[in-house]
């Protein structure tokens, strides 16, 4: 742990040595209310930034389901029994975050959704935390948060920022509305940095250019012992391995994570990774380069003035400003090819790791079914396989939920997939030995697994796919 903290500090010290290109700004007074949350309030004061921010609306990506055969076909199996098996979308722009969140089936079909889910979606969150204190985290989205949003930000409108863009991720999440200094508005980040021993009060401007993003682009869980508060598992450090150790330690201490999900196929309690871009980046080759350097490069507007781009998307669309500022000796084509190579290798290993993980769930299912039929399979063997499944799933889920397809840390993502594949294969091996000892026909089991996977892939209605992951051969074993 000490080592991890040391390397974080070292990284931030190194980063601080990189001269920032920020133009020296005079102390500013916008005249706005210090608690201003409405994005429209900033429009007339910063017309160039507004124009850039509005581009988050223009390049609207189609909402694509991540469980599509062209992306991650095994999701309805590996998340069976959990909302993510039903609907799991790719990211869209910041200005759509609140609207997407309020309309995704995981929320609309879950009457118990809590406010913690909305924490990284709206500029009204700091105000709600102020008003409700730690009661905020567990408040009900439908009966408490929606009425609050309707009252303070409603009725939802439909103009240049869409229905909820005026209260979606915006200026006041990253800036003090009066001075426009960068600031941290989410207590989950300051808590996490404290646990790492990082002095955020004295963070440099360069640090802040990444820390504003770390408010949301991180792994987190809702702490059942602490009002369901959004908490970062940073007790041991930031690598995926550190976070795994910490989560396991906590699970053993607290008797598991009651808030997380249990697979219907393998009866395994599982942790869901969120979007650990900050952590993945923090031990990758670009850890001395800030998030804003690549994602918010300086761009000339009106032919002369330079501003930081406020259109958050792929730096590959701004390769000249985002990359060639440092890699000027490399051609754009070379850089594109390098990124594609990294991402292709990442996707290949991801699909392989998910496929093996899906099989491992079915092996556990078979053990549970056989045990219930009276065959000699011990609880310990089942538990051992389940533990391996959980570990295998975590180590593909982290780099998969991270949205750069491995670019932020090519080695970190490969190491994670290698551990994942190793753990899932170990699960299958242990299960195979146990099942063979009671006379199971492993070839037939393999055949049934393949048939089931095909049925999931072939179902064309995305939110029906998960229903094919369970069948007569592989029943839901969670509820018995
Ligand atoms: C208050 C929370 C929050 C902060 C702060 C934040 N993000 Fe995001 N970001 C999100 C969420 C949520 C999404 C996904 C939105 C969706 O899919 O509707 C997202 C999406 C993105 C995307 C993908 C956009 C797309 O079109 O798919 C990029 C790139 C991104 N953020 C970069 C950054 C960077 C860089 C920073 C820091 C300068 C940052 N974000 C700060 C919450 C945040
Ligand atoms: C996700 C975080 C984030 C959000 C949201 C955000 N900004 Fe920024 N903004 C930054 C960062 C990072 C910088 C670069 C600051 C630096 O290095 O000095 C910046 C810089 C600025 C600057 C200083 C000049 C410049 O271009 O570098 C202004 C003015 C500004 N933003 C206005 C806005 C306005 C207006 C909004 C809302 C429409 C907004 N910002 C939303 C992160 C954000
Ligand atoms: C060295 C440049 C660089 C740095 C530094 C960097 N990124 Fe990225 N980021 C990229 C590239 C390249 C991609 C992949 C884009 C693509 O696939 O088109 C990416 C992808 C992303 C995505 C997914 C975008 C999408 O369209 O879905 C998010 C979110 C993101 N980065 C956030 C961050 C955050 C947060 C940080 C800081 C902790 C960060 N990035 C640091 C270059 C960078
Ligand atoms: C502020 C400077 C800076 C910016 C901006 C920057 N890089 Fe880098 N890049 C570096 C440094 C430093 C390294 C690490 C060199 C090393 O470790 O030997 C690096 C390494 C790389 C590598 C090799 C990675 C590996 O696996 O070892 C690639 C590929 C790369 N950069 C692509 C990009 C792309 C694409 C962008 C824009 C999205 C970008 N860089 C933006 C400084 C930068």
Image (cartoon, rainbow, N blue to C red):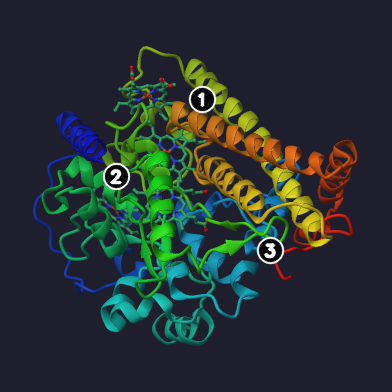
**Disc 3 to disc 2, C-alpha distance:** 35 Å
Q: Could you classify mark 3 by the number of other residues whose Cα lies within 10 Å: few (under 14), some (14-19), or many (20 or more)? A: many
Residue indicated by mark 1: 339
Label 3 or label 2, whichever comes before in sequence order = 3
In front here: 60 or 187? 187
Q: Where ligand 4 lies, by quadrant?
A: top left
**Disc 1 to disc 3, C-alpha distance:** 35 Å
Residue indicated by mark 2: 210
In front here: 391 or 417? 391
SS type, badge 1? helix
Q: Position of residue 452 (x, y in %)?
A: 85, 48
**Disc 1 to disc 2, C-alpha distance:** 21 Å
**Residue for point 37% across, 30% down:** 284
SS type, badge 2? helix
Q: Could you classify mark 2 by the number of other residues whose Cα lies within 10 Å: few (under 14), some (14-19), or many (20 or more)? A: many
Regarding residue 469, the answer to whether it shows in the image is no
Q: Position of residue 370 (x, y in %)?
A: 81, 55
Q: Position of residue 261 (x, y in %)?
A: 58, 63
Assess whether mark 2 and mark 3 are in contact (beta carbons under 8 angstroms): no
Q: Is mark 1 within 8 Å of ligand 4?
A: yes
- Frontmost of labels 1 and 3 is 3
SS type, badge 3? loop
Residue indicated by mark 3: 81
**Residue for point 32% across, 50% down:** 234
Label 1 or label 3, whichever comes before in sequence order = 3
Regarding residue 419, the answer to whether it shows in the image is yes
Label 1 or label 2, whichever comes before in sequence order = 2
Q: Is residue 82 above or below residue 8?
A: below
Q: Is mark 2 within 8 Å of ligand 3?
A: yes
């Amino acid at each position: 742990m000490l080592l991890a903290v040391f390397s974080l500090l070292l990284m931030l010290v190194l980063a601080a040595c990189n001269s920032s290109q920020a133009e020296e700004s005079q102390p500013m007074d916008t005249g706005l209310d210090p608690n201003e949350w409405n994005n429209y309030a900033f429009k007339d004061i910063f017309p160039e930034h507004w124009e850039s921010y509005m581009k988050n609306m223009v390049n609207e990506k189609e909402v694509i389901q991540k469980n599509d055969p062209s992306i991650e076909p095994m999701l309805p199996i590996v998340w069976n029994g959990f909302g993510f098996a039903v609907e799991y979308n790719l990211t869209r722009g910041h200005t759509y975050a609140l609207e997407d969140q309020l309309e995704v089936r995981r929320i609309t079909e879950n009457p118990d959704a809590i406010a913690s889910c909305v924490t990284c979606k709206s500029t009204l969150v700091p105000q709600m935390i102020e008003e409700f204190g730690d009661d905020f985290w567990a408040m009900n989205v439908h009966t408490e948060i929606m009425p609050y949003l309707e009252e303070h930000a409603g009725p939802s409108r439909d103009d240049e920022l869409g229905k909820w863009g005026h209260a979606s991720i915006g200026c006041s999440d990253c800036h003090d509305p009066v001075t426009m200094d960068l600031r941290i508005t989410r207590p989950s980040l300051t808590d996490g940095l404290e646990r790492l021993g990082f002095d955020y009060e004295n963070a440099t401007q360069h640090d802040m250019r990444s820390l504003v993003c770390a408010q949301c682009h991180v792994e987190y869980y809702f702490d059942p012992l602490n009002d369901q508060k959004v908490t970062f598992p940073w007790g041991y450090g930031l690598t995926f391995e550190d976070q795994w150790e910490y989560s396991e330690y906590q699970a053993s201490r607290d008797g598991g994570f009651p808030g997380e999900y249990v697979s219907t196929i393998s009866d395994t309690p599982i942790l869901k990774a969120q979007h650990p871009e900050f952590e993945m980046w923090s031990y990758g080759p670009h850890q001395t380069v800030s998030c804003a350097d690549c994602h918010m490069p300086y761009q000339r507007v009106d032919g002369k003035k330079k501003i930081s781009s406020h259109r958050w998307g792929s730096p590959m669309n701004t390769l000249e400003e985002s990359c060639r500022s440092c890699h000027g000796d490399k051609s754009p084509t070379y850089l594109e090819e390098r990124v594609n190579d990294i991402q292709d290798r990442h996707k290949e290993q991801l699909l392989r790791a998910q496929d093996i993980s899906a099989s491992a769930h079915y092996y556990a299912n078979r053990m549970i079914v056989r045990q219930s039929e009276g065959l000699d399979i011990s609880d310990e063997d089942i538990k051992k396989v389940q533990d391996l499944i959980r570990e295998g799933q975590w180590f593909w889920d982290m780099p998969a939920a991270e949205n750069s397809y491995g670019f932020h840390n090519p080695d970190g993502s490969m190491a994670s997939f290698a551990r994942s594949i190793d753990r899932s294969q170990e699960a299958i091996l242990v299960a195979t030995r146990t099942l063979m000892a009671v006379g199971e026909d492993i070839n037939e089991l393999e055949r049934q697994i393949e048939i089931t996977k095909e049925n999931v892939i072939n179902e064309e209605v995305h939110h029906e796919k998960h229903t094919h992951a369970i069948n007569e051969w592989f029943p839901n074993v969670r509820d018995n």
